[in-house]
Image (cartoon, grey):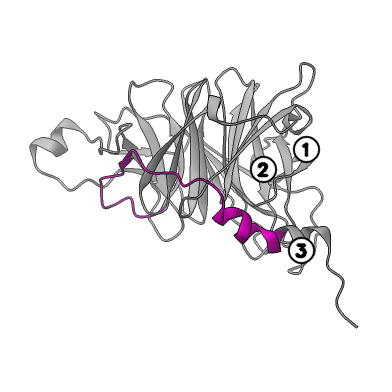
Amino acid sequence: MKPTLTIATLALALLPSLFAKSPKLEPYANIQPQAIDESSGIVKSRQFKNVYWTHNDSGDTARIFPITRDGQGIQTDWAKENDKTYEGITIGEAVNIDWEDIAADDQGNLIIAACGNNANLRQDLAVYIIPEPNPNEVWKTRIRRRIDFHFPDQSPYFDPTNLNFDCESLFYANDKIYLVSKNRSNTLAKLYRLDETEPFVSNPLTLLGNFDLKGQATAADATPDGRQLAILTYSGCWVFIAPEDSDDYFAGQTFYKPFRAKQCEAICWDDENTLIITNEQGGLFELKLSDIPPTD
């Protein structure tokens, strides 16, 4: 008897052929510092002009890197005067275990998603809140707060056969932190909001909705006004317009642009009409909102 193919299985099987027909993205620049060897998140600073923050995935120390829009490293005047190797900004009291995304809030903080969960086994998922450092003056900082969390719909036994609780996408909007799951058992993505932020306990997320991205979410970012949400997958970019009376972005108007580019895992809004994408190979790509058609 032949095995039954689910809709999700068929969708995943078709992805390679669909991906091959998609337009190829070409980088407009490359990240220059060699210390950034696996860019896994990017966000535009809300305080400093022409500053973008990125970080490496697992395997690196706890640090973030300020770069310019064209990929040049930014470091302190003292380091430049003394020909010091570019090493980014160290974050005390933090540990880099699967750092997957970064966001900026409107209170002068950066938010790091320490919640990669490939095997569905982690019980130490967290976000780090750090005061955004001045990249021209500071070479080390510390966390302001750590918030531990868990998925309310995940089995307490962390079933390794249900790989739908990986998370590589985090964004800030409406005075809240949101996360988007990277499902590995199907092509759905779940949207969660972090409502409870008690210290020294694991806080349950609030599940808002789900959406079939036809792929796996690798990064997310919202515009500063919280109206537009961009979600990156390995094969394209989705944009959601929030409904008037809800922050369930998945219930709003949707836009989608398929493309080809190697292992894209970071996205941020440069302005309300332009997105910047990076891949783990250090490419910087630009995508205009006008080039992302509606799905209706």
Residue 63: percent from the left, percent from the top? 37, 46
Q: Earlier in the sequence, mark 2 or mark 3?
A: 3
Disc on res. 231 = none
Q: Amino acid at mark 2?
A: Val
Which residue is rendered at x = 31% and y = 36% of the image?
67
Q: Which residues are magenta?
A: 12-38
Residue located beneath label 2 in the image: 180
Secondary structure at badge 1 equals strand
Disc on res. 206 = 1
Residue 135: percent from the left, percent from the top? 29, 31
Q: Quadrant of residue 26?
A: top left
Q: Residues within 10 Å of mark 3 (few under 14, many from 20)?
A: few
Residue, far left:
82
Residue located beneath label 3 in the image: 9
The label nearer to you, 2 versus 1, is 2
Asked if labels 3 and 2 touch by Cβ distance under 8 angstroms, the answer is no
